[in-house]
Amino acid sequence: MKKIVAASLSVLIALGIGVRIWYVNTHVDPMFTPPETEVYQMGEWIELAGDFQYSAYENTNGYSVKMEDIEFMSPEEYSEKYDIDLSLFRLGPNGEMPESVADVTLNFRNTDNLDGYIQFVYYRLYSDSDLRSFTPLASVNAVLHPEMDEQLGFMIYPGTESGPNHFCLVSGVEMSGTVYGNYKHFPKYLQISMTPTRKVIEIPEK
């Protein structure tokens, strides 16, 4: 009986190690930054070529991204521009809103991928001097793009191009209140993949 129990435990331990290895090989912690970074410019098509934000299951082979434009404005200006309820920007414990909103215009295309997708929730806009990155505001992007899932994931049909599309990224709001000053720092970079190669689009000061 003891031999059977010991053997069972060994199988369970081996299975657990195998699952852990599989997870590490197919996922990446969102805080992880790989050593290799490729910098691209606005207006050029960038092939993702399998590079992804969080999970290898994104399968971005055949997907490309192009950044057409970016404009910084206040939440009030963004709300008026797209006729969006201003209350969606109240992120702080006392209704504080982000100092700045980045209106990012992107184009996506897919040559022949039948099951890949874009995981937009992990896109981020930053500079080396920012206290906190601009990140996608899910509630607003869901209004702009109802086809997105709750993790802001979406697919492009093979052989098609989607865009230009507008996306909403906001500067930080902490429990202590609004984070100020991030929109002033340039150059900024839009991260479009995190690993195996980190790909970013450089945004010069206008």
Image (cartoon, rainbow, N blue to C red):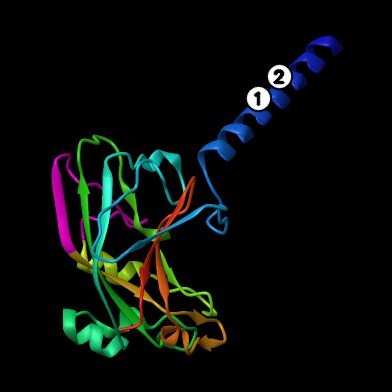
Residue 175 place in picture, x, y as percent? 55, 82
Inspect the image, locate mark 2, and give the three-letter code of the amino acid beneath it. Val
Q: Residue at horizontal 62%, vertical 33%?
A: 21
Looking at the picture, tell me which residue is in the foreground, 81 or 52.
Answer: 52
Residue 36 place in picture, x, y as percent? 52, 52
Q: Which mark is residue 60?
A: none
Q: Quadrant of residue 134?
A: bottom left
Rendered-image quadrant of the N terminus: top right
What SS does tag 1 mark? helix
Residue identified by numbered label 2: 11
Picture layout, residue 187 above or below residue 94: above
Identify the main secondary structure in magenta. loop
Picture layout, residue 75 above or below residue 48: below
Looking at the picture, tell me which residue is in the foreground, 69 or 19.
Answer: 69
Residue 164 place in picture, x, y as percent? 16, 63
Q: Residue at horizontal 35%, vertical 82%?
A: 205
Q: Which mark is residue 15?
A: 1
Residue 149 located within the stretch drawn in magenta: yes
Inspect the image, locate mark 1, and give the three-letter code of the amino acid beneath it. Leu
